[in-house]
Image (tube, helix red, strand yellow):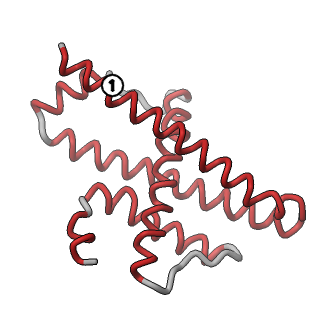
Amino acid sequence: MKDLLDKLTSYNIFNYLLPGVLFAVFVTKITSYQLLQSDIVTGVFVYYFFGLIVSRVGSLLIEPLLKRLGFLKFASYDDFVAASKNDPKIEMLSESNNMYRTFCSLFCMVAIIAGYDYLSDHNSTISIMGPYVSILLLLLLFLFSYRKQTQYIAKRAEIHKR
């Protein structure tokens, strides 16, 4: 377990593990769902997975929405890669930036889960369909995450080819 924890980068801790733990705590405290784990080993994996989901929602939904609304403006990816080579602090700033996006996603998701919990108490159809819809949404989330990551890899390969 110590070896595993030693391999976690600050990015993994602040963008996956911490948001996953907070997600489990908030959802457990304000809904009828019990997400907190009694076993620490299982907890690390479960919380990491929760954080991964929260992060992906931020990347695939929150960030594009905020860009579309004009709240965010990004530099081109080519400029980001070039600037990262010349200014190592940009990587650290980007990591912090991603953490803030993940926390925005965290609070949105906690609100959605709380709303779902309330609605499922008052509508049995929602309660019955919830697990199936959740699995479908998770599949779509990770399919689109896979596509986005593949596009980043392809862009970086193209930049290095030039």
> Residue 140 in the image: x percent, y percent?
60, 42
Residue at x-position 62% and y-position 78%: 34
Number of marks in the image?
Answer: 1
- The quarter of the displayed image where residue 11 is located: bottom left
Q: Secondary structure at mark 1?
A: helix
Report the quarter where the C terminus lies. top left
Residue at x-position 55% and y-position 39%: 61
- Rendered view: 94 above or below 2: above
Q: Is residue 15 left or right of residue 129?
A: left
- Rendered view: 3 above or below 37: above
Q: Which residue lies most toward the left here?
A: 86
- Rendered view: 52 above or below 98: below
Q: Is residue 45 left or right of residue 135?
A: left
Q: Is residue 53 left or right of residue 10?
A: right
Number of residues whose C-alpha sits closer than 10 Å to that of mark 1, classed few (under 14), some (14–19) or many (20 or more): few
> Residue 86 in the image: x percent, y percent?
10, 30
Residue tagged by mark 1?
154
> Residue 3 in the image: x percent, y percent?
21, 72
Residue at x-position 45% and y-position 85%: 39
* Residue type of the residue flagged with mark 1: Ala
Q: Is residue 157 left or right of residue 27?
A: left
Observer-nearest of 122 and 140: 140
Residue at x-position 48% and y-position 69%: 46
